[in-house]
Amino acid sequence: MVALGLIVGGIATYAFFRVGTLTLGGDEEFAPIAALWFAMFALAPGFFLPLEQELSRALAHRTAVGEGGRPVVARVLVLMSIIVAVVVAVMLVTSPLVTDAYFDGQWVMFAALVAAFAVYAPVFLARGICSGTGRFGSFAFVVGSEGLLRIAGCLILGWIGITAVGPFAFVVALSPLVAVAAIGVRGSLATEDGPPAAWREVTQNFGWLLIGTVCAAALINAGPVAANLLADADEAALVSRFGYGVLLARVPLFMFQAIQATLLPRLARLAARREFDEFRSGFRLLAIVVGAIGAIGTVGAFWVGPWVLDLVYEAELSGRTLAMLALSSAIYMLALATSQAVIALEAHAQVAIGWVLGVVAFVIGTWVSSDEIFRRIEIGLVASSAVSLAWFLGALRHRLHAVS
């Protein structure tokens, strides 16, 4: 069910970029929406995914021992509210800089970004409740419907003749709430009352998880964000085309999310049982599979990527650019898989450090590597993923030696 939802959501995302471009009239007109989309996913998952994971873990544990999870949900809701308040306050303080540098002075786009960040709090809360209580059909519905709802919203706006970018931006920001409301109405978010929840029940390793996921989410969306910041004012269409290339290079990552949803619990069970030989063999097989998928994706991006990009988006990027983006995505997948193994061995701090080092490597690589806008970002992306992967492999080896 989760894989199906991710497939639908992934296809809908690609379709949304195409429909949005056609509805607004071209790459240049769609560029602010693309910038909003990548900034939105650089922010929201980083701050809210750790809470989704902690909520899911805590609810699954309570379900297993026959206890109601409503107090846990209440605790997570408080934490999410605090995060929303703090992050929105920081965004408001920095709004003149962000609006001028990233949105070319379009305040409506900044307002949509703030709205989108706040909207994703209940979305990730709903996902945590659904996964923690085993309601995977509802989880898949939330994940899969986002892109479809955005496409529907864009088509409705185009049909009634609206061409201003502001309404489209708020369709992007607010669409996920519809799915949350729908599963809420049918009772998929209901939880039973139970024993009071101590803060440690939902904050175990939360600080390290938060640092790690914020940096990991920033890295996966760093390419288009950096392109938007570094490009000149007359290069909006170029930035949109680069965003299309990033989406194409991410095809394997959409599928990896389904593997990731089951990877961490399996590795954690093996580690808890101290079955480290099976842990090693399972991780080795996973690394081979992910590496093979990444290699195929990189070669495919070089040879057929430009043709696919022209067919789907009528956009032009070189095979070299697409291959570099696919290579960085492949290395990122390996780093993500390895980080999950390190988390399963309860070395959360090492994961946070690895992703922080990746962000530093991206900044340095993008800064000093080249004067050509795409090439410097490509080098930064590959360097960042490689640095994080190297750190996680070292941490995994050290941790396995220590516990076995």
Image (cartoon, rainbow, N blue to C red):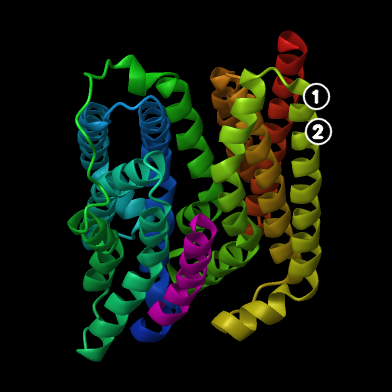
Quarter of the image holding residue 178? bottom left
Quarter of the image holding residue 404? top right
Report whether residue 106 is seen: no
Residue 273 image point, x, y percent: 65, 19
Q: Residues within 10 Å of mark 2 (few under 14, many from 20)?
A: few
Q: Residues within 10 Å of mark 1 (few under 14, many from 20)?
A: few
Report whether residue 33 is seen: yes
Q: Amino acid at mark 1?
A: Asp
Q: Secondary structure at mark 2?
A: helix
The reply to whether dot 1 and dot 2 touch (C-beta < 8 Å) is: yes
Q: Secondary structure at mark 1?
A: helix
Residue indicated by mark 2: 281
**372, 346: nearer the viewer:** 346
Residue at image coords 51%, 63%: 4
Magenta-tinted stretch: 1-20
Residue at image coords 41%, 70%: 31
Residue at image coords 53%, 65%: 7
Q: CA distance from mark 1 to mark 2?
A: 6 Å
Residue 7 located left or right of residue 308: left
Residue 285 image point, x, y percent: 80, 42
Residue indicated by mark 1: 277
Q: What is the magenta segment's predominant secondary structure?
A: helix
Residue at image coords 71%, 11%: 403
Quarter of the image holding residue 155? bottom left
> Vertically, is 86 above or below 22?
above
